[in-house]
Amino acid sequence: MKMGREAETGVELVANLHAHTPYSDGEWHRQRIAEAAARAGVDVLVVTDHNVYVRGADRFVGRVLVLAGEEVHDPTRQPQASHCLIYEAREELAPLAAKPQALIDAANARGGMAFLAHPFEVASPLTFDLLAIPWADWEVRRFAGIELWNAMSDFKARARSWPLAVFYAFFPSWALRGPFPQTLRKWDELLTSGEKVVAIGNSDAHGTVFHVGPIQRAVLGYEVLFRSVNTHLLLPRPLTGDVEADRQAVFAALRAGRCFIGYDRPASTRGFRFTAQSGAQVAGMGETLTRSGVTTLRITAPRRARLRLLRNGACIAQRTGDTLEHLALEPGSYRAEAWLDYRLARRPWVFSNPITVR
Ligand SMILES: [Zn+2]
Ligand SMILES: [Zn+2]
């Protein structure tokens, strides 16, 4: 069993693990995107162009670690489905796009990992560009995780009419409502069945400029999105400046699920923690704890919020405040959420990865 070292020490990095450049259908190149990420307070940016892995692109731009991943899909498939984010395979895997299980296995065999991108989506009726592209191959196994919250999917689902789309393009913070209930249900189902499935939250930024009559607007541009949905990674020690070592440390934290999804727009989620303690053992997000008697589950938030503790997908405790402590006797998959009142609605702010209590 691993100890929850990061609960006391370590370093938190804000990561955005899904963005596009002109190597596929994005507007800006790495350098400019990384500068936007730095302004938004993002520490790690993974560029995931469609069906292209850009070798040799890993580097620091200022203090932002920019890494290459790949978003693989089969462009001949109709309707479009099953986009897969590949990290750390360090090789182009697009030739396997038509065979999702072979793709996932190839990523794993190369020491990489596969995440199911925007697994549920709702089409916007407005344009062909906003079709739903869900995951359609749920029989696959051995994937590392799912993209629980994709900001562009969220926006797409809310853009039900042109007036609404234009409003949200100018005031995106009104659009974002959180992961789809179907995605959360699926994740909880997988966790409850004992699968290790790491949840991540991303921008899927393209910087695409839309034209509506005389109005031209980048709908959810890079910087706006980097200030929105991110994955906060907990590492045992700060980055060193050595790209190779730092890349490995970042992806090790991701693989372990030592991370949470933060919607940083209403307020920074930096400092959110979720731990479990039983006897002398402590576990953090992504870790497993073997009970000895009662288990104390503890949520700590950087500001007052509606805190929720869930076991196997069901809420077992909630309170408004900056901490929640709960004593549990049962094993299960425990995870934490925080919600804030923002833009006239109660909106999701944090989703932790689970702690497995045995
Ligand atoms: Zn996609
Ligand atoms: Zn994408």
Image (spheres, rainbow, N blue to C red):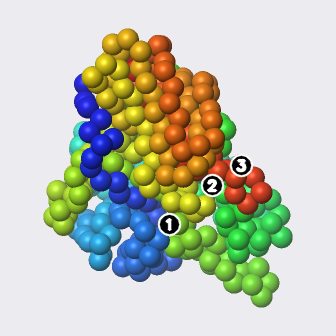
Q: CA distance from mark 1 to mark 3?
A: 21 Å
Residue denoted by label 3:
346
Residue denoted by label 2:
153
Q: Residues within 10 Å of mark 2 (few under 14, many from 20)?
A: many
Q: CA distance from mark 2 to mark 1?
A: 15 Å
Q: Is residue 239 left or right of residue 196?
A: left
Q: Are marks 2 and 1 in contact (CB under 8 Å)?
A: no
| Residue 316, above or below 43 | above
Residue denoted by label 1:
226
Q: Earlier in the sequence, mark 3 or mark 2?
A: 2
At x 40% / y 78%, what residue is drawn?
35
Q: Is residue 116 visible?
A: no
Q: Is residue 322 visible?
A: yes
- The image quadrant where one finds the N terminus is top left
Q: Assess mark 1: CB under 8 A from ligand 2?
A: no
* Element carrying mark 1: helix
Which residue type carries mark 1? Phe
Q: CA distance from mark 3 to mark 2?
A: 19 Å
Q: Nearer the viewer, mark 3 or mark 2?
A: 3
Q: Quadrant of residue 165?
A: bottom right
At x 36% / y 50%, what residue is drawn?
233
Q: Assess mark 2: CB under 8 A from ligand 1?
A: no
Q: Are marks 1 and 3 in contact (CB under 8 Å)?
A: no
* Element carrying mark 2: helix
Name the spot of residue 209 as percent of width and height, x first.
62, 78
Q: Is residue 259 left or right of residue 2?
A: right
- The image quadrant where one finds the C terminus is top left
Name the spot of residue 23 as percent of width and height, x first.
41, 71
Q: Quadrant of residue 30?
A: bottom left
* Element carrying mark 3: strand
At x 33% / y 48%, what residue is drawn?
234
